[in-house]
Image (cartoon, rainbow, N blue to C red):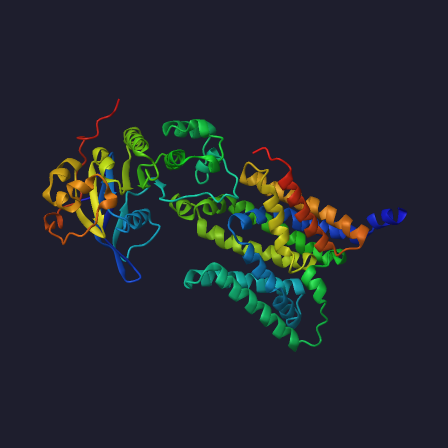
């Protein structure tokens, strides 16, 4: 069953905290060269699922399988360096992984912030900081990249550029990327697989298929696709169509053409 | 004037300087982590347990410093254990331990009528009464603390910036954090006799806070903090000699003056 290109398999992950079910039998499979986007409203369990995938927290039930020996890059949802700690960008990205300066330079170039290599981390803007975090995750040349809301705090243009960048990273590093977002609209285009999470996987599939799917439209509503802030997850499981559908989808080169 | 020259050459002053220098050197790198990790109250909690340690040492026939060391390490271990179990805020837990340890120390003291106890030296330190055995404790503990701190520097720094990211990147974070907790206990126990219970945290925190403005990297801040602590020590000892003020309190006063001075000097960052 395990495919050669499988990087990460989460099987029937169940997790509760304080008697609240956060995740209920969630399945996720991520392949090499694939971008999977996890969408869902606040409190749907997205970050928890990512932390379980990383091994930072243990699920109550279910299994986590990571391809043995793979390196994992991680961008957490929220990271602020305590203001009393003086630190440059180059030092920050090498906190866990040692690297010579030319490699640091290269990875910062990749995310477009190489001019900030000697800047203090306390002086960066939100967009710059997200790119520095991404660069840090890339420094170990990961084959699996887990990004928790990488586009938070960015305007629409900034988000578009960042998603282009993520796509380019996938093409350059040939890695699998699992990305958490609450911004439905922008994410769709660059993903190979979209998973809608509300404690369980409500529906999943390729963005093109999903977008025309009645279950998906019922789930998000055409008006709400513009802005997820207005989206309330109040359907009563009329989307049974996808309830037991196989979540893993084979890698398709389909929507992933290089931008040269 | 010749009186001053005589004082300068006296062995007690040099012992005070050597002992103080040992504390100042380790206070830099340890203090910066205490500042970054917001652990100032933890240092205070350990200091509060000092009296209990002195009593324990007396009861078991050990040296006071060894008694303090045992109690500090036990308290550190208890704290690590409770933090993992209890859903109490860190400062509540520390307050609970600090005052319980202090109360127990006072109760224990009441039972020991044969213990001659200099409360003032205990609270405010006795820098000018440092003996050779104290120097061995300070430098022994200081060197061990420095070596271990250098060994765990990388994972500890990564965890100080962001714990879950450091864990995800495969750093041995938990081991480093537990070792650091024990290191602080070790240094506070070894330095307590000369700096005093009430002033020990000041020497860890004030030089680190002074260094922050001038440092460009974490390591620079640690080295600057040590140098600033050394400078405060020299100034404090001279102040104490000239005006016959309590030595440890003079050192802390000088450290604070340096801190204030550091705010006036324009930084290059």
Lateral position of residue B213 relative to residue A123, left or right? right
> How many numbered discs, if any?
0
User: In this picture, is B26 found above or below B65?
Assistant: above
> Residue B73 versus residue A185: which sits nearer the camera?
A185
Q: Which residue is drawn at the image coordinates 13% and 53% (left, top)?
A: A237
Quarter of the image containing the C terminus of chain B?
top right
User: In this picture, is A104 found above or below B36?
Assistant: above
Q: Which residue is drawn at the image coordinates 50% and 38% (left, top)?
A: A87
Horizontal and vertical percent for residue B68? 62, 63
Lateral position of residue B193 relative to residue A138, left or right? right
Q: Which residue is drawn at the image coordinates 70% and 55% (left, top)?
A: B249
Tell which residue pokes out farthest to the top in this image: A260
User: In this picture, is B116 found above or below B142?
Assistant: below
Q: On the image, which quarter does residue A60 sit in?
A: bottom left
Horizontal and vertical percent for residue A255? 19, 30
> In this orientation, does residue A135 appear?
yes
Q: Which residue is drawn at the image coordinates 13% and 43% (left, top)?
A: A217
> In this orientation, does residue A39 appear?
no
Q: On the image, which quarter does residue B216 sit in?
A: top right
Lateral position of residue A35 relative to residue B163, left or right? left
Tell which residue pokes out farthest to the right in this image: B2
Horizontal and vertical percent for residue B70? 59, 64
> Residue B31 versus residue A29: which sits nearer the camera?
B31
Horizontal and vertical percent for residue B57? 64, 68
């Amino acid at each position: 069953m395990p495919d050669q290109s499988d990087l990460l398999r989460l099987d029937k992950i169940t997790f509760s905290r304080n008697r609240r079910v956060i995740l209920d039998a969630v399945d996720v499979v991520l392949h090499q060269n694939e971008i999977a986007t996890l969408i869902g409203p606040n409190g749907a369990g997205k970050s928890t699922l990512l932390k379980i995938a990383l091994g930072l927290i243990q699920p109550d039930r279910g299994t986590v399988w990571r391809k043995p020996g793979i390196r994992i890059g991680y961008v957490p949802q929220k990271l602020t360096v305590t203001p009393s700690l003086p630190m440059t960008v180059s030092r920050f990205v090498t906190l866990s992984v040692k690297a010579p300066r030319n490699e640091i330079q290269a990875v910062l170039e990749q995310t477009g912030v190489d001019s900030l290599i000697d800047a203090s981390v306390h002086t960066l803007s939100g967009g710059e900081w997200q790119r520095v975090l991404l660069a840090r995750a890339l420094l170990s040349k990961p084959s699996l990249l887990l990004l928790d809301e990488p586009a938070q705090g960015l305007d629409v243009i900034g988000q578009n550029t960042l998603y282009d960048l993520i796509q380019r990273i996938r093409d350059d590093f040939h890695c699998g990327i699992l990305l958490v977002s609450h911004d439905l609209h922008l994410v769709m285009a660059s993903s190979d697989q979209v998973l809608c999470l509300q404690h369980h996987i409500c529906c999943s599939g390729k963005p093109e298929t999903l977008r025309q799917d009645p279950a998906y439209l019922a789930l998000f509503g055409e008006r709400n696709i513009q802005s997820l802030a207005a989206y309330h997850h109040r359907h009563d499981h009329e989307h049974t169509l996808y309830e037991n559908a196989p979540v893993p989808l084979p890698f398709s080169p389909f929507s992933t053409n290089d931008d040269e | 004037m010749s009186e001053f020259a005589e004082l300068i050459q006296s062995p007690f002053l040099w012992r005070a300087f050597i002992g103080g220098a040992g504390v100042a050197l380790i206070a830099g790198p340890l203090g910066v982590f205490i500042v970054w990790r917001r652990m100032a109250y933890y240092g205070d909690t350990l200091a509060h347990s000092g009296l209990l340690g002195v009593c324990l040492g007396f009861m078991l026939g050990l040296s006071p410093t060894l008694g303090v060391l045992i109690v500090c390490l036990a308290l550190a271990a208890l704290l690590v254990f409770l933090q993992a179990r209890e859903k109490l805020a860190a400062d509540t837990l520390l307050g609970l331990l600090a005052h319980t340890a202090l109360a127990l120390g006072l109760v224990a003291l009441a039972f020991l009528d044969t213990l001659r106890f200099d409360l003032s030296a205990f609270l405010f330190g006795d820098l000018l009464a440092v003996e050779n055995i104290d120097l061995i404790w300070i430098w022994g503990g200081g060197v061990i603390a420095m070596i271990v701190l250098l060994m765990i520097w990388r994972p500890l720094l990564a965890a100080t910036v962001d714990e879950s990211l450091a864990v995800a990147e495969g750093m041995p974070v938990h081991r480093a954090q537990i070792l650091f907790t024990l290191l602080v206990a070790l240094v506070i126990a070894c330095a307590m006799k000369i700096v005093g219970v009430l002033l020990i945290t000041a020497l860890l925190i004030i030089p680190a806070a002074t260094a922050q403005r001038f440092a460009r990297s974490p390591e620079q801040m640690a080295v600057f903090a040590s140098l600033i602590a050394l400078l405060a020590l020299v100034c404090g000892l001279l102040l104490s000699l000239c005006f016959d003020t309590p030595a440890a309190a003079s050192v802390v006063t000088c450290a604070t003056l340096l801190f204030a001075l550091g705010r006036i000097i324009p930084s290059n960052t």
